């Protein structure tokens, strides 16, 4: 399956940024993606990162 940038939806080649959120062309698109999220989406994202539960 082709990887796509979560921000611009461009297909990614060998050079891309991979992190907990997903795949991005570069850090710039990662940054823009985060800024486009609503607060609630951002919070949900943070929750999905945390495998450890501290409740
Ligand atoms: Zn991109």
Image (cartoon, helix red, strand yellow):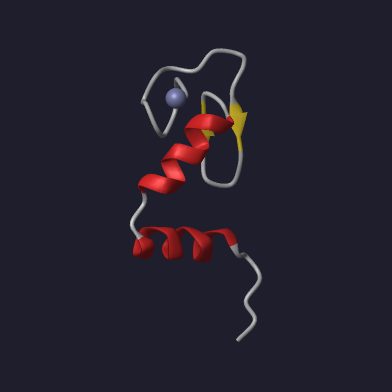
User: Measured from the top left, where is residue 10 in percent x and y?
Assistant: 39, 19
- Which residue is at a point 35% across and 65% down the rendered structure image? 40
Q: Quadrant of residue 16?
A: top right
Q: Is residue 35 above or below residue 29?
A: below
Image quadrant in which the C terminus is located: bottom right
Classify 2 as above or below 41.
Answer: above
> Visible in this render: residue 4?
no
Q: Residue at x 45, y 47 (%)?
A: 34
Residue 5 x, y percent position in the rendering: 44, 27
Spot the residue most to the top: 13
Residue 43: x and y in percent read: 44, 65
Left/right of residue 12 with respect to residue 39 in the rendered view:
right
Left or right: 39 as drawn, with respect to 24: left
In the rendered image of this protein, does residue 25 appear above or below residue 20? above
Which quadrant: the N terminus? top left
Left-right relation of 6 to 23: left
Residue furthest to the bottom in view is: 55
Task: State the residue at coordinates (54%, 13%).
Answer: 13
In front of the other: 53 or 10: 10
Can residue 23 be seen? yes
Residue 36: x and y in percent read: 36, 46
Q: Is residue 38 above or below residue 27?
A: below
Q: Quadrant of ligand 1?
A: top left
């Amino acid at each position: 399956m082709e990887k796509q940038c979560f921000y611009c939806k461009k297909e990614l080649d060998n050079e891309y940024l991979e992190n907990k959120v997903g795949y991005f062309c570069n850090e710039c698109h990662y940054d823009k993606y985060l800024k486009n999220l609503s607060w609630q989406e951002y919070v949900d994202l943070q929750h999905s990162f945390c495998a450890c539960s501290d409740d």
